[in-house]
Image (cartoon, grey):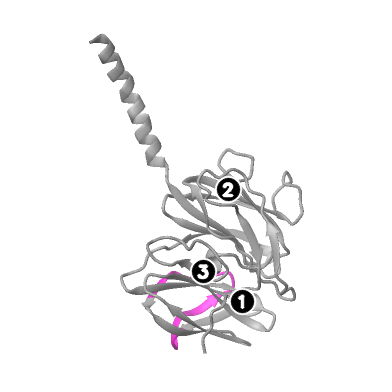
């Protein structure tokens, strides 16, 4: 009986510890982006809290370049941005923290002009109302300080200022013509918005004026896209005015507990990811 009582007493804290541990486990997703037009290429590092070894390193990240979503254990992380080619131990140009919750997705983006560069943590939506699609707008064009964004001729964001991120808005699932209208340039694209999909429409400075890029945040079932060149932010993207040649860069990766595959970043012109209909 004494042995049984001892075992019971020992089992109680063990069970409580296991319960507490299970409540903090889970998987979230994170992706990194460079959306500052006049900021040179940078190296971006992701660290888990209390660990000086980077779990993800992106080298020579230029304007318009983003990473795929990567699955990470829920918890606290920090993101550091260094000048491209700088020593990993050097002082970051910028850094920020992000708490990744289970079943949530986040984008950490370098935003604004070089003189006021900031790292912004965006909470990415993964679900939609039944039968709807959802979109938001990131205004990352420095040449056109303010744009109006329309969908099917209806204004979605009347005055998107440079460096701003709009709230998500539900729209009927359909094929829509969208426009970013600035004071000196207009960009037009046409995309199919399927039910259950979530999109981030990014307005960029292109080689010939404005560009709109359709980035898929979620393709249904509350999950971010697995990645690929046709999925925008969810895949790999590259864009740089005056530098349209594709490139491939291997990424230095630390040990990610929930990482499902090798992490790599391919740089392509973002324009190639557009699926514009006639």
Q: Residue furthest top?
A: 2
Q: CA distance from mark 3 to mark 2?
A: 21 Å
CA gap between label 1 and label 2 equals 31 Å
x%, y% of residue 58? 66, 55
Is residue 61 visible in this depiction of the protein?
Answer: no
Pointer 1 and pointer 2: residues touching (CB < 8 Å)? Answer: no
Vertical relation: 193 (above or below) 87 = below
Residue identifier under label 1: 272
User: Residue 165: which numbered mark, if any?
Assistant: 3
Distance, label 3 to label 1, CA atoms, is: 23 Å
- Answer few, some or many: residues within 10 Å of disc 3's Cα (few below 14, many 20 plus, some between 14 and 19): many
Magenta stretch in the rendered image: 151-170
Q: Is residue 86 visible?
A: yes
The structure residue drawn at horizontal position 32% and vertical position 23%, both measured from the top left corner, is 11
Residue 184 falls inside the magenta stretch: no
Q: Which residue is pictured at 43% across the width and 83% down the height?
A: 175
Q: Are marks 3 and 2 in contact (CB under 8 Å)?
A: no
- On residue 78, which mark appears? 2
Quick one: label 3 or label 1, which is nearer the N terminus?
Answer: 3
Give the structural element (helix, strand or loop) at label 3: loop
Q: Is residue 49 above or below residue 179?
A: above
Tag 3 and tag 1, C-beta contact below 8 Å: no
Identified at 62% across, 73% down, the residue is 270
């Amino acid at each position: 009986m004494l042995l049984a009582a001892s075992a019971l007493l020992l089992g109680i804290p063990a069970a409580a510890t296991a319960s507490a541990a299970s409540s903090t486990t889970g998987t979230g997703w994170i992706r990194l982006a460079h959306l500052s037009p006049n900021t040179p290429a940078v190296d971006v590092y992701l660290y888990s809290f209390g660990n000086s070894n980077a779990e993800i390193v992106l080298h020579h990240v230029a304007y318009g370049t983003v990473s795929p979503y990567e699955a990470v254990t829920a918890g606290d992380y920090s993101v550091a941005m260094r000048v491209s080619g700088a020593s990993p131990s050097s002082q970051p140009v910028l850094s920020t923290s992000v708490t990744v919750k289970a079943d949530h997705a986040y984008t950490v983006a370098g935003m604004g002009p070089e003189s006021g560069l900031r790292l912004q943590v965006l909470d990415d939506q993964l679900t939609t109302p039944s039968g709807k699609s959802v979109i938001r707008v990131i205004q990352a064009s420095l040449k056109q300080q303010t744009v109006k964004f329309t969908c099917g001729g209806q204004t979605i964001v009347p005055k998107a200022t440079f460096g701003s991120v709009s709230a998500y808005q539900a729209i009927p699932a359909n094929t829509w013509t969208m426009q970013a209208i600035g004071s000196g340039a207009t960009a037009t694209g046409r995309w199919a918005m399927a039910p259950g999909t979530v999109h981030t429409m990014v307005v960029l400075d292109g080689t010939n004026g404005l560009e709109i890029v359709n980035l898929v945040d979620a393709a249904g079932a509350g999950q971010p896209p697995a990645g690929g060149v046709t999925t925008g932010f969810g895949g790999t993207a590259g864009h740089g005015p005056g530098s349209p040649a594709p490139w491939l860069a291997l990424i230095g990766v630390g040990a990610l507990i929930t990482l499902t595959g090798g992490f790599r970043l391919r740089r392509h012109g973002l324009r190639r990811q557009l699926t514009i209909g006639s």
